Image (spheres, helix red, strand yellow):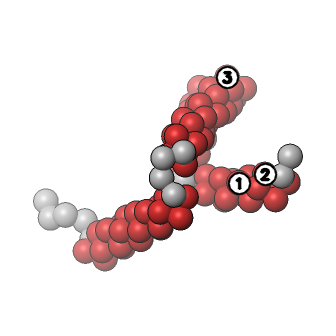
Amino acid sequence: MDLRVFATTFGLVFLAELGDKTQLATLSLAASSGQRWLVFAAAALALVLSSLLAVLLGEFLRSRIDPLWIQRSAAALFLILGTVMLVSSLRGPPPT
């Protein structure tokens, strides 16, 4: 097992998930339902399955596209989405 890949993946996913809307929704469900272990199990399974889909898609793309282009495309997508979110937040809420 490549511990560097494991640690990098764990660190990136862990930090990306802290405080995101999924974690806040899980927190809310656990608080309102009173069934923390059931909420934990369902949230953990959902994250595992979504990660499995991402890994399978990544492997599929890797076999057909040069990994350098996948990295460049991901970087461009992050920049575009970040710019859109930044511009949206600077504009403020839409008029009512």
Q: Could you tell me residue 64's position as x and y percent?
A: 48, 47
Residue at 51%, 58% in the rendered image: 66
- Residue 38 relative to residue 87: left or right: right
Residue annotated with mark 3? 38
Snapshot quadrant of residue 32: top right
- Residue 76 relative to residue 46: left or right: left
Q: Amino acid at mark 2?
A: Phe
Q: Amino acid at mark 3?
A: Leu
Image disc number at residue 9? 1
Going by the picture, which residue comes out furthest to the left?
96
Secondary element at image label 3:
helix
- Label 1 Cα crowd, 10 Å radius (few <14 / some 14-19 / many 20+): few
Q: CA distance from mark 3 to mark 1?
A: 26 Å
Residue at 25%, 74% in the rendered image: 91
Which mark is first along the chain, 3 or 2?
2
**In the displayed structure, would residue 80 be above or below residue 43?**
below
Residue annotated with mark 2? 6
